[in-house]
Amino acid sequence: DYAKIDHHRSLRNGLPEVIYAAGKSPEHTSEIFARMAATGIDVLATRADEATAAAVLAATPTAKYHQQARAITLRQSPPAAPHGHVAVLCAGTSDLPAAEEAAITAELFGAKVTRLYDVGVAGIHRLLAQRDILATANAVIVCAGMEGALPSVVGGLVAVPVIAVPTSVGYGASFSGAAALLGMLNSCSPNVCVVNIDNGFGAAYTATMIARASHR
Amino acid sequence: DYAKIDHHRSLRNGLPEVIYAAGKSPEHTSEIFARMAATGIDVLATRADEATAAAVLAATPTAKYHQQARAITLRQSPPAAPHGHVAVLCAGTSDLPAAEEAAITAELFGAKVTRLYDVGVAGIHRLLAQRDILATANAVIVCAGMEGALPSVVGGLVAVPVIAVPTSVGYGASFSGAAALLGMLNSCSPNVCVVNIDNGFGAAYTATMIARASHR
Amino acid sequence: DYAKIDHHRSLRNGLPEVIYAAGKSPEHTSEIFARMAATGIDVLATRADEATAAAVLAATPTAKYHQQARAITLRQSPPAAPHGHVAVLCAGTSDLPAAEEAAITAELFGAKVTRLYDVGVAGIHRLLAQRDILATANAVIVCAGMEGALPSVVGGLVAVPVIAVPTSVGYGASFSGAAALLGMLNSCSPNVCVVNIDNGFGAAYTATMIARASHR
Amino acid sequence: DYAKIDHHRSLRNGLPEVIYAAGKSPEHTSEIFARMAATGIDVLATRADEATAAAVLAATPTAKYHQQARAITLRQSPPAAPHGHVAVLCAGTSDLPAAEEAAITAELFGAKVTRLYDVGVAGIHRLLAQRDILATANAVIVCAGMEGALPSVVGGLVAVPVIAVPTSVGYGASFSGAAALLGMLNSCSPNVCVVNIDNGFGAAYTATMIARASHR
Amino acid sequence: DYAKIDHHRSLRNGLPEVIYAAGKSPEHTSEIFARMAATGIDVLATRADEATAAAVLAATPTAKYHQQARAITLRQSPPAAPHGHVAVLCAGTSDLPAAEEAAITAELFGAKVTRLYDVGVAGIHRLLAQRDILATANAVIVCAGMEGALPSVVGGLVAVPVIAVPTSVGYGASFSGAAALLGMLNSCSPNVCVVNIDNGFGAAYTATMIARASHR
Amino acid sequence: DYAKIDHHRSLRNGLPEVIYAAGKSPEHTSEIFARMAATGIDVLATRADEATAAAVLAATPTAKYHQQARAITLRQSPPAAPHGHVAVLCAGTSDLPAAEEAAITAELFGAKVTRLYDVGVAGIHRLLAQRDILATANAVIVCAGMEGALPSVVGGLVAVPVIAVPTSVGYGASFSGAAALLGMLNSCSPNVCVVNIDNGFGAAYTATMIARASHR
Amino acid sequence: DYAKIDHHRSLRNGLPEVIYAAGKSPEHTSEIFARMAATGIDVLATRADEATAAAVLAATPTAKYHQQARAITLRQSPPAAPHGHVAVLCAGTSDLPAAEEAAITAELFGAKVTRLYDVGVAGIHRLLAQRDILATANAVIVCAGMEGALPSVVGGLVAVPVIAVPTSVGYGASFSGAAALLGMLNSCSPNVCVVNIDNGFGAAYTATMIARASHR
Amino acid sequence: DYAKIDHHRSLRNGLPEVIYAAGKSPEHTSEIFARMAATGIDVLATRADEATAAAVLAATPTAKYHQQARAITLRQSPPAAPHGHVAVLCAGTSDLPAAEEAAITAELFGAKVTRLYDVGVAGIHRLLAQRDILATANAVIVCAGMEGALPSVVGGLVAVPVIAVPTSVGYGASFSGAAALLGMLNSCSPNVCVVNIDNGFGAAYTATMIARASHR
Ligand SMILES: Nc1ncnc2c1ncn2[C@@H]1O[C@H](COP(=O)(O)O)[C@@H](O)[C@H]1O
Ligand SMILES: Nc1ncnc2c1ncn2[C@@H]1O[C@H](COP(=O)(O)O)[C@@H](O)[C@H]1O
Ligand SMILES: Nc1ncnc2c1ncn2[C@@H]1O[C@H](COP(=O)(O)O)[C@@H](O)[C@H]1O
Ligand SMILES: Nc1ncnc2c1ncn2[C@@H]1O[C@H](COP(=O)(O)O)[C@@H](O)[C@H]1O
Ligand SMILES: [Mg+2]
Ligand SMILES: [Mg+2]
Ligand SMILES: [Mg+2]
Ligand SMILES: [Mg+2]
Ligand SMILES: [Mg+2]
Ligand SMILES: [Mg+2]
Ligand SMILES: [Mg+2]
Ligand SMILES: [Mg+2]
């Protein structure tokens, strides 16, 4: 009995359990996905490669694969007005996988999502041009690799929590995202908090909770 | 001109600038504190030692020193009902400085604060006994050193964001809080996000934003 | 003469030498396995991939390959009642390779093994539901990746040694198991001791010694 | 309410809660010590400096301070035959604080303790001369700093678990015990498991559990 | 013969040898300072504490101590128009020691220096307000601790090299400046290069070379 | 809209934006390259593998691929006398990729480039034989892996800035270039500043700015 | 001109330059090998894979490939009595590549070599059985991975220098040889010095110098 | 019985046991020193502070304290011609403690010692001026902090082993000697081997063995 699905999580945490496909065989992921789908809830699998997506969609044809986000979603809940507004920013084009994982997750969990991509600090005018839309978000997710400077600048511009996602983008002394991670943890903007490297999912989970509570 | 006080921060960020006393002489901190007090706002200085506290209270006698939190506060705003509810937990007695820094900050910024101390995971019944009160918080701050396991357990029990504060409590392979920091970043509870080691202030800043937005 | 088999180890250590296949060619492992089998003892090879397993089973057809554990066993000793009881826990589905390496090793060395899998701390009720069976073990092995929080919680629930096995499960700031390792070394439960990342074999070796001594 | 004493720990874990004095004021430690003494059990405080010892002995004059071990003990249980035999080894004279912390702890918890000190691997004959006495222990604790090589050699000589305690003895690339810690985690002797740097207490806690179970 | 002064350095490198006082006794520094002064050149000693300054000024009364910069200077060359323009920026008040070390060094070596202090990225308007003066510099030095984000933003605003100086300002995961150092090495602005943590002197040495060459 | 090309960079920074191909698909790089080419400027793409080069040259046949440098260039500006002189050195044959990336970049940006390769410090006569040509450079780039000692020696020989590029050449304790990086940051020659591991591009960007300013 | 062969090295260093094939194409290595062979000296290439060996032997058919050592040798000097005696030890079977690289190098450079393999400390009797032959060596090379304990034990048994070679053998907290490296640097035997991880070549180069000088 | 003096070491290792005073009380060191002196041999204590020196000289008035080397020596053997020649180099004035520890040790153990201090690579002419005397040494010790580049340059100039001693001299990214250590381990001169940070004693121990064997 290799997996105990935590069916009570929605009750305890307000949001359902999610499948982390990285360490699982396509068959295992597909089976768990189908079992969760059968309960009628919205289902999300993260870190799914092409082979896993193929297996899941074969068993659950109504599911959808988001390639750049490496995520599989199944929406079964009735359409509803979004619960709050989450802005997802990224510094450069290479940060897209984390940013899209965050955006897809927040959308599935019911938030309105605004994507602001390739707005890194080396050309600060690109970010400043978006201040108006930033000001309307209930929570902001900022994905950045290399020096990870963007969350501090964003944190100084908004009055809501900023969830910083260091990405593994970079080379050499980026140490696979550790440099960005350390930068974000030391942010001089006090409304910045941090999740694991490339963890767009976790950022969106928390951001959605905040947006939903702000919306109520 | 060694300091440019950011008087607009309240407007941009919803919360005022705060004095970080660690790198400053008692005279500098005292002078900045007095300048900010003169504008009529609530003032907070963190990481203030006894000498700094003496200097500040000499110049601003209505300020108050919180020794365990190493914080100086001056409340000038009129009394008001709290804006939301923040729970502050810590794993052991030695985590108190970070926990109190968080609690004092959240209270000054207008939140109701519940303190749940010494509820580490080696005696899990102590935490489980507090589930009812935990369930009423709008945001939870969890301070823990050593292995930093507490936020994951708490994250699994509540439906709101958990801000994890690794503390420098421990010895040897705790590497001054790095072990707790890494543990928290890898939390298997997706509603956990993390701030710098011993950064009770930053955790409270974000938690207060969340509690305030949830309360509205 | 590339290998000096330590035939006296059973006498000195009470348990036989074991083949670590990771750095060896399939031919070398197969030959050493056969040489040890010829002495009539129970034989174990760990970290054996499919190619190694094929070579060993070709030469020693009575051996058995345990794929998930990456282990090859040959039981030649007469059936006997188990010497003590070892519980093997793991936090998530992805920790199975280490957990199964531990379970297979302990079983070959004569212990009764109870497997309790996917009982991570984010859903603490799953672990608490198993307290009765945990209470009957003579030694407990706990495998966990990511933040490695499970051994501390288990340590607080039992009256026997807990051997913690950090696993390389996770990404980003898990640093291939280093985060879990550090967490476990800093456990606030004093009956926790630690072995190398993914070293299910070593954990089982020690746990079996304890269980056997407790049983006598 | 800064401390919740875990009075049930003896019931759950078989051994009582212990006071970690490092992060506490002498007054706090003294008061907790007295509260625990009042329940009639044996009491232990570790990491106690001279000032703490003075405060504790003033309030509880029957307590005893062990300077080298930095430990305070109070024995209140009736005399009894020892429960099993623990050998405590150390590599060099500078490892004595950790070794004595282990020895004092194991003795208070009821084990017979044999001390074998200054038997490091650079003069291997010193260790080999003690093989007979080593062979009679139910568990062995090995404290070593610098390269931490001693546990592997000892592990190859005995048929019981070896609990390795890396110490912070050394300089330069010893990185305050990290080198010894890593060495011990990679031990080629599979009956070695490891605790935190300088954690003689934790080693003794586990070793006593093993010795006690072996003795029954 | 503990020191071989490199009198040819001006010829080889265009700038004179400088005394690094950190590892030297006040007497040694004072004697070397006097020996160099006797040759008629401008003399600079860095990392000089109060005791060293007292010893140097006793022997060389025309020297001057710059407390915040921890530097001692002796100007003996005839007054001259500045050779180029160096801007020195810092993110926060606590970065002043490094910034002043840079400013004093560049001034002694003949550059015009503009100080722009406390312009960190959490209040980006403070930096943007200085764009005009920034545009006139031949080289820019940027000192920042914590997340070290400022050089990237500055690099995107100017058409000259930016020498980034990570400072040891911060706590916890700043790891004494390592976080800022890594951030700066990964800067997405390609005109940023980096010197050692707190090395204001080295930054000024290079910046002065650039400014001087640009001025010619 | 995955990429916002920063067309104003030439105006702000004096040098155009450059395409970092490492994180992009061949199609994306090819399209961005073509869009930039259409504006009539010189275009550079770095970290381009064979597949990317094929895609770019198919769409922009006048572009040129430099295999060892992993760079694609398109020169569209009219021929002009070089703006200053940059020397590019490397310690060993394996440092060529970084050295060539630097050389190609500096040439495209208008500098005269002198290559001095395989002049590592283990045979110091090889470097000393090149002192005359070194003396004519306006800026020097030094690429070295392993112990990264070459920049310090070069820094002591010239009167211009030395941009040090640590390379990932080496094995074991070179830790993929970290050893060379640390060595260079600690250089005892104060005219040495450092860029990221293998970042020949960034070194050339800064060196060209210096050479150009020196030339005017 | 990608390579400057250091033909004077024999004169300066007493031993010829050696080709490090790891970063070179088979063609480059083959051509350098042939150029050196043409001068009539003994030639050695290290870290040569199968493809490189094929290229070298095609151009220089009298060369010989040593697969386990990954080395190519060409002996052209007249036969001679060995210059001194080097013992090469390794702890386990997986350390053979480094040990063989050392042995082949020392033999080519003229030493008598004794191989003592698989004598790790977990079965210390295997080493003690070789004390007589150890006593006759002029220098000892010890290769070990995992905890790297063997050099300390050997250092205590002999009266000559011990060159320790940490190997990348192990997993998890061995961190690719870093654990063994740190252990060896902290050796409590003062006649132990250390080379880079897996650097059998460098160890043999130094050991041969010592053996040769001792023999004279 | 806190110390087992290894009186047989001279027989096994050719050089006597040495007292490492760092972890011992002045009384312990003084007593051990006196016990060893009573046997008539030459005695050495390293890492001795002023208080320890006072205690030792009080008990053994013929001993001598070398303040810069932090060493205490007692010569009792009859005068003899030196056994071989050891050169001790250091890069800067601040490396003197390690260099003097090496020089004093080698002299006591019977070698002729030549000191060449402050010959760092930033002014390479200082080293080249000493080539003739370097050429006469049987072994060379090179102490250097910061980037640790000196051993590689020296290694290329001599035909004997170079023992490299990284020192803790430096700041910031020197990480207390780790940068120098890594640099030396990666030396491109193959006759360089390395000891622990600041370990002048160990370097001299090995260098003396080499010089003595070369001299015979
Ligand atoms: N991309 C992700 N990163 C971190 N945690 C995740 C991710 N996706 C899912 N999870 C968490 O992993 C848990 C499932 O783990 P498992 O039992 O191994 O399938 C879920 O409850 C999620 O909270
Ligand atoms: N998975 C494993 N992890 C760590 N050590 C192991 C493992 N499997 C076997 N060993 C040990 O490795 C030793 C054999 O190593 P070797 O001489 O290299 O074959 C055995 O005596 C075991 O104690
Ligand atoms: N090899 C390189 N290393 C570091 N930065 C680079 C490199 N090549 C280009 N860049 C920078 O990367 C920026 C483009 O990043 P992106 O928006 O992700 O395409 C350019 O403006 C360059 O300054
Ligand atoms: N396996 C090895 N490890 C370290 N250095 C080596 C090795 N093999 C050869 N070398 C050194 O590398 C130098 C040649 O480097 P290169 O110029 O890149 O070919 C030689 O002079 C040797 O001293
Ligand atoms: Mg871009
Ligand atoms: Mg407690
Ligand atoms: Mg699960
Ligand atoms: Mg001793
Ligand atoms: Mg400020
Ligand atoms: Mg070469
Ligand atoms: Mg073996
Ligand atoms: Mg000097």
Image: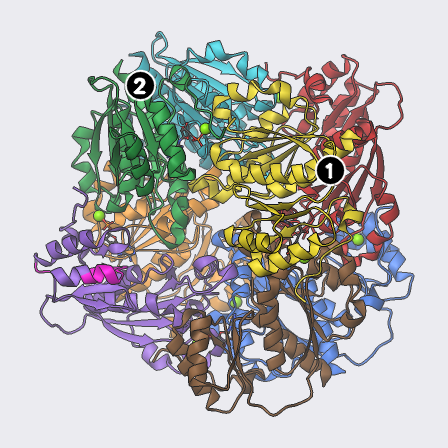
Chain colours: A purple, B orange, C green, D cyan, E blue, F brown, G yellow, H red
Chain name for mark 1: G
Q: Please tell me which residue lies in front, D61 or F113.
A: F113
The region drawn magenta spans A40-54
In the displayed structure image, the side of residue A39 where residue H147 appears, left or right: right
Question: Is A47 within the magenta?
Answer: yes
List x then y, in percent, for residue A180: 45, 61
Q: Residue at x 26, y 30 (%)?
A: C63
Give the residue number, with chain letter if any, for mark 1.
Answer: G209
In the rendered structure, the answer to whether residue G92 lies left or right of residue B101 reads: right
Find the distance from the CA under tag 2 to the CA under tag 1. Answer: 49 Å
Badge 2: chain ID? C
Q: Quadrant of residue C110?
A: top left
- Asked if residue A211 is positioned above or below residue D35 in the image, the reply reads below
Residue E170 vs residue F123, the one in the foreground: F123
Which label lies toward us, 2 or 1?
A: 2
Element under disc 1: helix
Picture coordinates of residue F201 (x, y %)?
Answer: 57, 72
Residue type indicated by callout 2: Gly
Q: Is residue A196 above or below residue H13?
A: below
**Residue that carries the numbered disc 2 in the rendered image:** C40
From this viewpoint, is residue B1 visible? no
